[in-house]
Amino acid sequence: MSDQQQVRRDALANFLRTRRARLTPADVGMAPGVRRRTPGLRREEIAVLAGVGVTWYTWLEQGREINPSPEVLGSLARTLRLDTAESDYLFRLSGAMPAPRPLPDTVEVPAALVRLVHAQSPAPAFLIDADWAVRAWNPSAEGLFDFPAWEPEDLNLAWIAFAHLPGRARTVDWEQHARRLLAHLRSTYAARGGQDTAAGRRVAALLRRLREHFPEADAWLDEHQVQDRAGAAKDLLHERLGPLRFDQVVLVAPDALQLVVLSPRDAETADRLPLLTAGETAPAAA
């Protein structure tokens, strides 16, 4: 075992001991029993409640070379009354991927995030949720994507990327961006837990809808490309304003909300952005 692995196992052992020490018998429905010399539950009590062997759990708290399964880690997390952040920490210290976090069916967008979207003006900015539904936008983003014109069921970034014909026409190398978007969606599907979770099933329904309506999406999804969502360069050839060059920045907020900002990459683009909402034509380049 490498020194780095031992450091991680020691951190796991210390974490388990401190979390065990903060629990009382009453927390887990046990009688107090005789007076305890140390705070918290005993190792054997945790082992019984989690359904694991006492010796095995003792070795785990001693930092020995043990590789617990995700199922056992989940049982320990429940027994130790860990919250979401603590459970993720337990999984990562054990060298396992944390279980997908359950997402609420509906998320209320905080007013602070809406203000942040508008504060990006004149750079186009909008907010999407875990299902890629567009939840808020500023006037510049409205000028590019016509968000108010979409029906509620179509107000989704993935759908708009394929269905918004002006957007397709003005996006330089639209196919590359569309393929990357589908790869992001596939990665999102797995991160949401796939068919085992409601959030994963909603992403699957969106993928099916794209397949049914857009032959390109149907063909490209068969390639099974996956890619984490991240920023990228995005260039437009706007029919009224001319070339617009952006760096697309994606910032993740709680409840899987994502702030997407199209940040101007050069001074010419920055100068033209106010015209997105002014209905004017950009001056010709010198």
Image (spheres, rainbow, N blue to C red):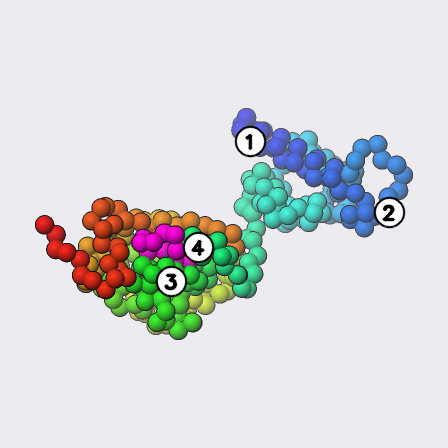
Viewer-side residue, 275 vs 3: 275
Residue assigned mark 3: 157
- Residue 29 visible within the image: yes
Percent from the top left, x then y, of residue 239? 19, 63
On residue 5, which mark appears? 1
Image vertical order of residue 255 relative to residue 211, above or below = above
Q: CA distance from mark 2 to mark 1?
A: 38 Å
Q: Earlier in the sequence, mark 1 or mark 3?
A: 1
On residue 30, which mark appears? none
Quarter location, residue 188: bottom left
| Camera-side mark, 4 or 2 | 4
Badge 2: how crowded within 10 Å, few (<14), some, or many (20+)? few
Q: Residue 120 in magenta? A: yes
- State left or right for residue 195 relative to residue 52: left
Q: CA distance from mark 1 to mark 3?
A: 41 Å
Q: Earlier in the sequence, mark 2 or mark 1?
A: 1
Residue at 55% of width from left, 58% of height from top?
103
The residue furthest right is 34
Q: Give the residue type at disc 2.
A: Ala
Residue at 36% of width from left, 49% of height from top?
249
Q: Secondary structure at mark 1?
A: helix
In the image, which residues are magenta? 118-127
| Camera-side mark, 2 or 3 | 3
Q: Earlier in the sequence, mark 1 or mark 4?
A: 1
In the rendered view of the protein, which quadrant contains the N terminus?
top right
Residue at 64% of width from left, 48% of height from top?
83
Q: CA distance from mark 1 to mark 4?
A: 44 Å
Badge 4: how crowded within 10 Å, few (<14), some, or many (20+)? few
Residue assigned mark 2: 31
Q: CA distance from mark 4 to mark 2?
A: 51 Å
